[in-house]
Image (cartoon, rainbow, N blue to C red):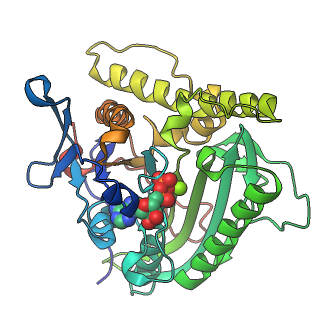
Amino acid sequence: MAGKRPTSPRSTASVQVVIRLRPLNDREKKHGTLPVVSASTADKSVTVIKGKGSHQARSSYGFDNVFTAFSSQEEVFDATLKPIIRDVMMGFESTVFAYGQTGTGKTHTMEGDLDNPEMQGVIPRSAKAIFEALKTPDYSHFSVSCSFLEIYNEELCDLLADPDSSGPKLDIMVGKNGPFCRGLSESPVESADDVFALMRRAQNQRQVGETNMNKQSSRSHCIFTLKIDAKRVLEDGSVLEVGGKLHCVDLAGSECAKSADLEKGNDSQAARERERKNINQSLLTLGRVVSMLKEQSQSKKKTNVRIPYRDSKLTRILQESLGGRCKTCLIATISPSVTAIEESMSTLNYAHAANGIVNKPVTTSFMSGSSSVSGELLKSSSGGGKNET
Ligand code: ADP
Ligand code: MG
């Protein structure tokens, strides 16, 4: 069936915020670690129990969606990325973030196990869904490319660049469609398998950096981007040129935003101090941006507050995903363990703050005429269903 022309668009959409609770791991089970966080899919809430006996206190938080320790990779994809992919295929730019303490399942949610179809995370599932959509008669021509950017220590690294060549210096620039990373390679892909191959290459590159350059991958932010240019055939036979983008962001461990426990006696303590400060910079700025946007969206008056996007590389490059023109989903991952309770509360508060952010998503699509350059630019804003405010 041919696609429909975008109709009567709405103008805003809230950032969709979901929580994923991971199961207790084998080590925790062996040590008899108590689970103190529970999740309910029925009322989309997470409850944390603090203290014991008469000092016990319960805090409950509601979200757009909640996944329990029993939720499958498929369920997470179906409820989060699947509707986003539909938007991307209509020409929207969308971003999904994984935020949470190290070891809570950010990479499991984003990438999962590429070799086991049941355990694949949202990136491989998105790649498959995109190529499946492109194979339908709704699309006549397409080109898809991938990029993989790592931000470590406020420095940008191209995870798909040839490791033997120094490559161009990466820089964040602002183009007509918002910020982009100049010099970042965009590798063409023709199938989901091509995407998987690039993901494996990027994983290797990160491991090489971890060993050779003493990096810790939990301290870096990874931005995987799929860019789709396609001709969409509408019901009346006319052709719309769509340019959609999907960014999947696996953030550094949330504990990096404040952890001051530098390894004692380490030779490179000064380097670690610098690293910690810089990682603080990106995650702390992200936190500040999130809370200022929330304040702004709750304020009845039109305020002219400067949102500090420019204070870190991460927020500069993701500016359109936060209060901008992207459609955005935040997946916050938490541990059920009593030992992680402070960090889990901090993640829940962070996610709660992001719950009120409003974006103004925009599609970029051109009617194909005699030439795409002279085509009419259709800029339509659209709301995100129940998240509309
Ligand atoms: P992070 O990227 O947040 O540091 P990982 O994704 O690497 O954490 O997860 C840590 C470990 O826990 C991995 O072995 C992962 O497979 C496992 N894990 C995380 N979340 C889940 C989950 N929801 N179900 C099953 N295993 C999980
Ligand atoms: Mg990880």
Residue toward you, 12 or 197: 197
Q: Position of residue 281 (x, y in %)?
A: 62, 28
Image quarter of the C terminus:
top left
Q: Residue at x 25, y 47 (%)?
A: 34
Residue 191 visible? The answer is: no
Please give left or right for residue 217 compared with residue 208 in the image.
Answer: left
Q: Position of residue 170 (x, y in %)?
A: 79, 48
Residue toward you, 302 or 8: 302
Q: Is 180 rendered above or below residue 291?
A: below
Q: Position of residue 223 (x, y in %)?
A: 59, 54
Q: Position of residue 51 (x, y in %)?
A: 20, 29
Q: Residue at x 58, y 59 (%)?
A: 224
Specify the farthest residue to the right.
Answer: 165
Q: Is 181 rendered above or below residue 81?
A: above
Image quarter of the N terminus:
bottom left
Q: Residue at x 67, y 35 (%)?
A: 263
Location of residue 276 by image quarter: top right
Residue toward you, 325 or 125: 125
